Image (cartoon, rainbow, N blue to C red):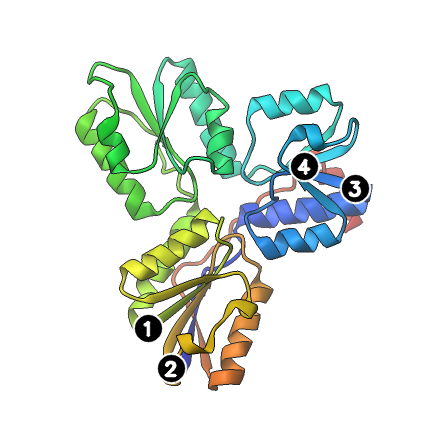
Amino acid sequence: MHVILANPRGFCAGVNMAVDALETALRAFGTPIYVYHEIVHNRPVVERFKKMGVVFVDSIEDVPYGQTVMYSAHGISPAIREASARRNLRAIDATCPLVTKVHMEAIRYAQEGYTIILIGHEGHDEVVGTMGEAPHAIVLVENEADVEKLTFTQEDKLAYLTQTTLSVDETEGIIAALRRRYPQIVGPNKSDICYATQNRQEAVKDLSAEARVVLVLGSQNSSNSARLAEIATQKGKEAHLIDSVAELKPEWFRPDDIVLVTAGASAPEENVQQVVEYLRNHFAATVESRTVREENVSFPLPRELRPLKVLK
């Protein structure tokens, strides 16, 4: 067996920042610390923090008055900030700056009188947060079929935005459908799709050509991880989205397979290495690291935590 280890893979700058922020807050404030929604969409990461005393909540009302709450990397709506203030919570905002960019675009377009068509997945934390910035002015579409159901005219003032973790190819198709139907529509100067999402998708597209099996480390509720598995499947590969080595099944593999291993932007590198070690031990796999694009992006800690970084 031969394993191709895709680069880039795993944690993006936003996830690194969010995980670092929660670890810093734990050292500075102790437990309990509450996190509104999962800090990132990765089950092993969430379980590790639970064992450290972090409490994850889906309602801000579940955070006791005056306690510390961290907002996840996916962002929140203004209503959640207001609810936190009413409960006198010490709030730490670990929203990814690339998600914040989309929020700012939504606010600007709404103030300028546009109706915003948001391309994303209904119910995703990021989409809920973005729509909360201007609920009166945002309509969600998930696919090209949804575009066909829209009832705007070519005289309406329209803009589009996208969830940051979508498939680049899928999003391009939806944007093209919007432009065909509404030539007047405007959008951001630069794509909203996260650089890390694009890079990981590019790596799978390029490197999966040589593989029969593609293993994607990531959780089922991770949009960007799911897209990686979808891309591999579209390329005709046998793709598996798994959280950890415990989910591997020997029957997926042949002794002479070429296996591509990658990870979504919220999946820890240690889980990748455990999978590689399994393939080494069970199939005498040789391992080759292949880099499609270099990444050198980093984001600072939330401003509330920057003075405390020295505690690390």
Residue found 75% across the figure and 40% down from its top: 33
Q: Look at the numbered disc 4 and give the secondary structure of its residue.
A: strand
Residue carrying label 3: 32
Q: Quadrant of residue 51?
A: bottom right
Q: Are marks 4 and 2 in contact (CB under 8 Å)?
A: no
Instruction: Locate the N terminus and report the quarter of the image it occupies.
Output: bottom left
Specify the farthest residue to the left.
Answer: 180
Alpha-carbon distance for marks 2 and 1? 10 Å
Alpha-carbon distance for marks 3 and 4? 11 Å
Task: Give the label on residue 254, or none.
Answer: 2
| 11 lies left or right of 202 | right
Residue found 47% across the figure and 84% down from its top: 283
Q: Earlier in the sequence, mark 3 or mark 4?
A: 3
Alpha-carbon distance for marks 4 and 2? 45 Å
Label 3 CA crowd tier, 10 Å (few <14, some 14–19, many 20+): some
x and y, in percent, of residue 266 in the image: 53, 52
Determine whether 101 is above or below 1 in the image.
above
Tell me which amino acid carries mark 3. Answer: Pro
Tell me which amino acid carries mark 2. Answer: Arg
Label 1 CA crowd tier, 10 Å (few <14, some 14–19, many 20+): some
Residue carrying label 4: 70
Q: Are marks 2 and 1 in contact (CB under 8 Å)?
A: yes
Tell me which amino acid carries mark 4. Answer: Met
